[in-house]
Image: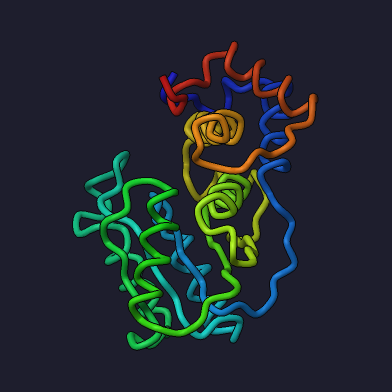
Amino acid sequence: MTSTSRREITDRQWADTTLLWDYQQMGHDLQPCDVAIGLGSHDLGVAAETAGLYLRGLVKRIVFTGGPNPSRPEAFPRGEAVHFAEHAVALGVPESAILREPNARNTGQNIEFSRAVLAEAGGTVASVLLVSMPYMERRAYATCRKVWPEVEVVCASAPMNLNDYVKTIGDDGLVIDSLVGDLQRVIEYPGLGFAVAQDVPGSVHDAYQRLIADGFTSRLLT
């Protein structure tokens, strides 16, 4: 299933989706960090949230990371990092505060390549504000702890609930597919060496299995 309209989603499916959504939120308290890393994605909200964190004084530098988006290449034809940086500048972030990493194709590369860009730019990085889509916080955290274990990681995303996020995307089924796919990665990636292991409560795992059985599978790894 690649798309499901809201009227076709049952109350139980929506309750299961909410369990996944709540689990993926790390619930970190925002605090000043040495740098913000805006992870490339199909969602310009990541760029806007990263810009907002800078304008609030929580960081003095930003790295936007990502090449062409694999699922929506037409949205960011010059790559995620380039378009995200332009959006942040339009929101008031000075060009001098932004570094671009235009080559990453996955979250591990987002972190690894951003680390290299920061090392080349100079300065000590002991803490990172890691900005992602709301449903991706936990996977981003687990990936960063694996790839860059020396830094303190604070996860951030646009503060919104599941219903509000669905409204911004405009496709309920796609959001559910994405949540299911991200949880699969949280579960499977540690065994592949891509991330640290995260405890998945039984209720969340059961909800995940039910949604897979219901056909919300377009974002699953094969």
For image coordinates 26% across by 56% down, the residue present is: 103
**Quadrant of the image for the N terminus?**
top left
Count of numbered marks: 0
Figure check: 217 above or below 170? above
**Looking at the image, residue 74 lies above or below residue 129:** above
Position of residue 63 measured from the top left corner of the image (x, y, whole percent): 41, 71
Q: Residue at x 32, y 47 (%)?
A: 105
Identify the residue at horizontal 61%, vertical 77% (top origin). 33
Query: Up-down: is 93 above or below 146?
Result: below
Q: Is residue 72 left or right of residue 175?
A: left
For the C terminus, the image quarter is top left
* Front residue of this view, candidates 97 and 142: 142
Horizontal arrangement in the rendering, residue 2 relative to residue 185 (left or right): left
Looking at the image, which is closer to me, 211 or 23? 23
Residue 112, by quadrant, is bottom left
Residue 24 at x, y percent in the picture: 66, 43
What is the image's colouring?
rainbow
Residue 211 position in % (x across, y down) = 62, 19
**Residue 201 at what x, y percent from top left?**
79, 31
- Asked where in the image residue 14 lies, by quadrant, the reply is top right
Image check: 85 left or right of 39? left
Residue 51 located left or right of residue 20: left
Above-or-below relation of 190 to 10: below
Residue at 43%, 53% in the rendered image: 43
